[in-house]
Amino acid sequence: MSRMTALIGKELVDQRRNPMLFMPVVIVALVAIMLPLMVAIIIPRLTDEKLSDSSDIEVAFEMYRDQPALLTLDPEGAIQAFIFQYFLLIFMLVPVTCAMSVAANSIVGEKQSRALEPLLATPITTMELLGAKVLGSLLPSIGMSVACMAFYLLLVLLLAQPGVAWAILGPRSLGVVFLLGPLAALAALQLAVCVSSRVNDARTAQQLGVTVILPIVGLFISQLMGAFKLTGPVILAIAGGLVIVNAALMALAVRLFDRETILTRWK
Amino acid sequence: MISASHLTRRFGTRVALDDLSIELKSGEIFALLGPNGAGKTTTLRLLAGLIAPTSGSVQVNGEAMTAASASKLRARIGFLTEAPGLWDSLTVRENLEIYARLYELAAPRRAVDEALALFDIRDRARDRPSELSKGLRQRVALARSLLHKPRIVLLDEPTAGLDPESAREVRELVLGLRGEGRTVLLCTHNLDEVDRVADRVAVLRTRLIAAGTPQALRERLFAPRILIRLRQEASRFEASLRGTGITDITIDQRQISVALNGTPLSTPDLVRQLVQWGAEIEAVVPEEPPLEDVYVRLLHSEGAGQ
């Protein structure tokens, strides 16, 4: 365990000294934060049109009828809360982008600097090494995700109708940020491990790994088109799917992250 | 200390190492020579427990290297890989500290301080490896591989690409390891370096071609020769020398090189004769063929034998 923490510490120092690594994450986070704010607050204010005049108010009430907090909101607040919660899926892109960027850079970087062989010559086991790589990428991803969510809620608290921030701070939001986010990030970074073993350039790894955002965007669009609502059971179902994907990717990552494979087949 | 018994490693259908058996003793520097692709790095990786043999075994202090014991046994081995493989985003001190913790040293900071002092890199401890010269990076890598004070040290081309001064420094550090009673296995293409530091040499081309002390290998392949340096032109004595029954004579301006094996003459007899013939002798030294000649001949004889 101490060997893992040593290596995780190294990963975190590495990330702190390479802040540009987080640039894609910052861009994704800004989009995830600004998009719902634009739709729910900025555009209505600029056009001087109330959201509650829209027919979507019924959809909002429909979605929130099981949430007592909504009943205390005025119609404008209810539809704002509806929009803010609708866009929560986009927040899954934050940990995913972060994990992908950090993991790809970490593994490809070590391949390029040929730092893996001396590392493998220490008593560290390959599972410890893989664990350190995964946690070293997952921790900042979850951190970024939580920070973005906190910032999002702060903006909602400041800019939206009173009570909206509390209304969206329910099990669904927490489920998206603390369950789906880390699971999606774990899938992304395991994909990064698999991809990184086959490429010698972090950007290529990131570009290949970016395919993991497609299902998230697909989910978001499906939700917009009314294919499903992001309810508790839906979140659990998505989480279940991610667990299966993660298990499959972990089996592949463990196979690729074998000491012998790294030394003899990673090019 | 560390031994390999009938070690074979295949990668698919390719045989990288075939039936290698060697035993390294405490306090000796053992050099592994061979052309590119001869299996030198594979041997080091097998001995370091980084990869598993297809067949055969490795023993470290009598304990077999297995999947279960490899992690523990790696803690007893220091492995300097061909590339320094330092983390450029970390300082020299941080690089060493992470490794000290990976080796689970009781006092990692103190171990790093000692290593920085021993390798004379204290003043560069806050620098990033990318700011160091190649020689200094190699020194940091060597410090890293010795942080945990291993009794067995495996060095993969430690002076490759270094300038003569840096190479000499690394060589002195390697000699220092022998002085401390550690076992050193050195993989290199630098035959002059091997001649300077190695106690024993093995020539490898997938399988072991020959092993022994440099002197023993020389004697095995080349007849002992004597080099005599004269004040005058040496060619004038060639006919007289041949008259004594010496057949293997090489003349080069004021130098005579002769092989005395197979003749009734000893070195003092020869010197006496030359003096009688009027030669003014400046020096008489045993002539040793360079290790490169031994190496090339071994490889050629192996090639011819195949």
Image: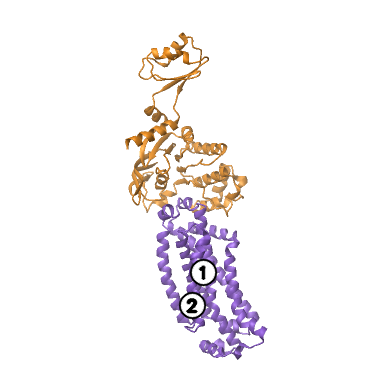
Chain colours: A purple, B orange
User: Where does residue B45 sit, x and y in percent of width and height?
Assistant: 42, 47
Q: Is residue A140 above or below residue A122?
A: below
Please tell me whether mark 2 sits on a helix, a strand or a loop.
Answer: helix
Quadrant of image for the N terminus of chain B: top left
Q: Are marks 2 and 1 on the same chain?
A: yes
Residue at (47, 13) in percent of width and height? B236
The mark tally for this picture is: 2
Which numbered tag is attached to residue A96?
1
Which numbered tag is attached to residue B290?
none
Give the camera-side residue of A29 and B22.
A29
Q: Amino acid at mark 2?
A: Leu
| CB-based contact (under 8 Å), mark 2 and mark 1 | no
User: Where does residue B49 sit, x and y in percent of width and height?
Assistant: 40, 49
Q: Disc 1 sits on a residue from what chain?
A: A
Q: Left of A78 or right of it: where is B297? A: left
Disc 1 residue crowd, few under 14, some 14–19, many 20+, Cα 10 Å: many
User: Where does residue B292 sit, x and y in percent of width and height?
Assistant: 44, 32
Q: Amino acid at mark 1?
A: Val
Residue at (54, 48) in percent of width and height? B111
Q: Disc 2 sits on a residue from what chain?
A: A
User: Where does residue B239 sit, x and y in percent of width and height?
Assistant: 42, 13
Q: Left of A248 or right of it: where is A162? A: right
Q: Left of B143 or right of it: where is B215? A: left
Q: Of the two numbered discs 2 and 1 on the same chain, state the one appearing first in sequence.
A: 1
Residue at (61, 91) in percent of width and height? A53
Residue bearing the label numbered 2: A219
Q: Is residue A217 above or below residue B26?
A: below
The reply to whether residue B103 is visible in this rendering is no
Please tell me whether mark 1 sits on a helix, a strand or a loop.
Answer: helix
Q: Nearer the viewer, mark 2 or mark 1?
A: 2
Disc 2 residue crowd, few under 14, some 14–19, many 20+, Cα 10 Å: some
